[in-house]
């Protein structure tokens, strides 16, 4: 959002200053900032055509993101680097985007002709045994976090997909396999370290800047750039799960046939077992999602109502069955229940904007 507003400002400026050299930046509005950043952080600025730029561009979940061409990509390794970059892009009005895991389904973490801050080097996993917390860099992906924590028999309320980044997840609620007991990922945060638009680095928590702390739990990129999320650690849980063919589960869970249960419905493939989070998220990835491609994602949140959800499934199936001949096309319908455990946890830990929307159990 921010980057769009900045882009608009640049266009206005160039209209007024039509004949000045500044107008040449409209074709490549990030150019000025890339040059300035190159002077201060030469080894961290990557230009189109360089190996590192192309590698990072390739590493997006959605093709729509990979197709945007920033004037440069900058890879900060400290919060001070992020602060310097923020000062540069805001004082020079350069459009910019922020990327952690690059797993958004729509173009949200790359920018055409601007500066992309690639946080993939901010990967600290700092376990504080005394406080029972772990500080996570936004660039880590959940598989790395779970692998590091499991060595100590610990885990965190993190993502279900191994490649989702800590950054976007912790600023957008965050639904975990532990959420029914522990609420959203963000409800377990004790502190965000954030770099504001003017470059100020702040610790934001329940006692310091508590309003910002509240807002950040669903704040995405709108308030600043989070350089570390400190979250409560959990004892490692062993959970029952696995990849099962969805359709059979459907009948058991939605038809409400008396006596029907998950265990006596026929399955096509079944890897259900008792295992750790790390293993389970690996399964979910390999069974559930195609890793590269062009995405269209729509979400709707409704009151939990089984007949309605069943209807949605039938309509979707009617539509997509007719498109079966289109090769390479996949469709997914994902029902995410949001049960009453979510708002309870949220209240216990200082609240979040989510509480404003909560009325009764819902499905997204
Ligand atoms: C296959 C798949 C599985 C998923 N599974 C889950 C799941 O189990 N649970 C769940 O809750 N969600 C899930 N999601 C959604 C995912 O959590 C969000 O898309 C999340 O925003 C991705 O974060 P990211 O850092 O990987 O993405 P990015 O594309 O890097 O970032 C997403 C957004 O957050 C902003 N942002 C990222 N980092 C920062 C930062 N440090 N400071 C400020 N702004 C930042 C970006 O600018 C962008 O707008 C899934 C998505 C996919 C595609
Ligand atoms: C983790 O738990 C297992 C099983 O309870 C135990 O055998 C192992 O010693 C524990 N490891 C650590 C590092 O505590
Ligand atoms: C909250 O922020 C203050 C400074 O702003 C810091 O001193 C304190 O340690 C933080 N609390 C936590 C739990 O991180």
Image (spheres, rainbow, N blue to C red):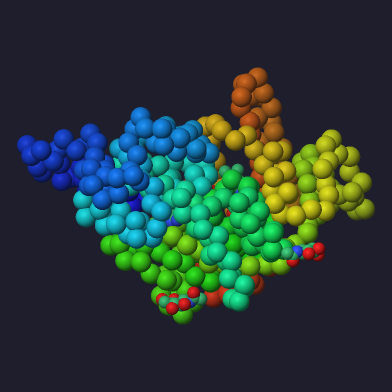
- The image shows residue 174 at horizontal and vertical percentages of 58, 57
Quadrant in the picture for residue 323: top right
Quadrant in the picture for residue 351: bottom right
Q: How many marks?
A: 0
In-front residue for pair 304/32: 32
Q: Residue at x 83, y 47 (%)?
A: 272
Q: Residue furthest bottom?
A: 207
Q: Residue at x 69, y 33 (%)?
A: 317
In-front residue for pair 82/104: 82
Q: Residue at x 69, y 63 (%)?
A: 152
Can see residue 12? yes
Q: Residue at x 10, y 38 (%)?
A: 21
In-front residue for pair 97/202: 202
- The image shows residue 186 at horizontal and vertical percentages of 55, 64
342 sits to left or right of 173: right
146 sits to left or right of 33: right
Quadrant in the picture for residue 350: bottom right
On screen, residue 133 above or below 164: below
Q: Residue furthest left?
A: 19
36 sits to left or right of 238: left
Can see residue 255? no
On screen, residue 64 above or below 219: above
On screen, residue 130 above or below 174: below
- The image shows residue 24 at horizontal and vertical percentages of 16, 35
- The image shows residue 78 at horizontal and vertical percentages of 40, 58
């Amino acid at each position: 959002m921010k980057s769009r507003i900045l882009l608009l400002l640049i266009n206005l400026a160039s209209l007024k200053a039509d004949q000045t050299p500044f107008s040449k930046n409209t074709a490549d509005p990030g150019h000025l900032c890339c040059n300035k950043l190159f002077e201060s952080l030469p080894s961290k600025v990557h230009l189109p055509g360089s190996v590192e730029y192309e590698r990072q561009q390739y590493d997006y979940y959605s093709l729509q993101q990979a197709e945007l061409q920033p004037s440069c990509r900058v890879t900060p390794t400290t919060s001070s680097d992020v602060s310097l970059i923020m000062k540069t892009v805001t004082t020079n009005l350069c459009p910019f985007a922020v990327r952690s895991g690059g797993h958004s389904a729509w173009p949200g973490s790359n920018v055409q002709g601007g500066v992309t801050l690639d946080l993939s080097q901010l990967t600290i996993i700092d376990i504080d045994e005394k406080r029972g917390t772990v500080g996570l860099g936004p660039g880590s992906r959940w598989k790395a976090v779970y692998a590091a924590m499991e060595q100590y028999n610990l885990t965190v309320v993190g993502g279900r997909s191994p490649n989702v980044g800590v950054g976007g997840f912790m600023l957008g609620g965050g639904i975990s396999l532990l959420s029914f007991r522990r609420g959203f990922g963000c409800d377990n945060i004790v502190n965000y370290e954030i770099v504001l638009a003017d470059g100020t680095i702040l610790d934001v928590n329940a006692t310091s800047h508590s309003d910002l702390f509240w807002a950040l739990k669903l704040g995405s990129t709108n308030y600043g750039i989070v350089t570390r999320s400190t979250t409560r650690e959990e004892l490692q849980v062993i959970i029952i799960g696995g990849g099962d063919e969805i359709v059979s589960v459907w009948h058991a869970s939605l038809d409400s046939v008396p006596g029907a249960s998950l265990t006596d419905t026929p399955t096509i493939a079944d890897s259900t077992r008792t295992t750790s989070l790390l293993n389970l998220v690996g399964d979910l990835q390999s069974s559930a999602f195609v890793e590269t491609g062009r995405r269209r994602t729509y979400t709707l949140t409704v009151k939990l109502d089984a007949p309605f959800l069943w209807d949605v499934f039938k309509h979707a199936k009617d539509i997509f069955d007719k498109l079966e001949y289109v090769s390479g096309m996949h469709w997914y319908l994902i029902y995410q229940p949001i049960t009453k455990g979510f708002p309870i946890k949220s209240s216990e830990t200082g609240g979040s904007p989510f509480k404003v929307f909560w009325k009764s159990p819902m499905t997204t």
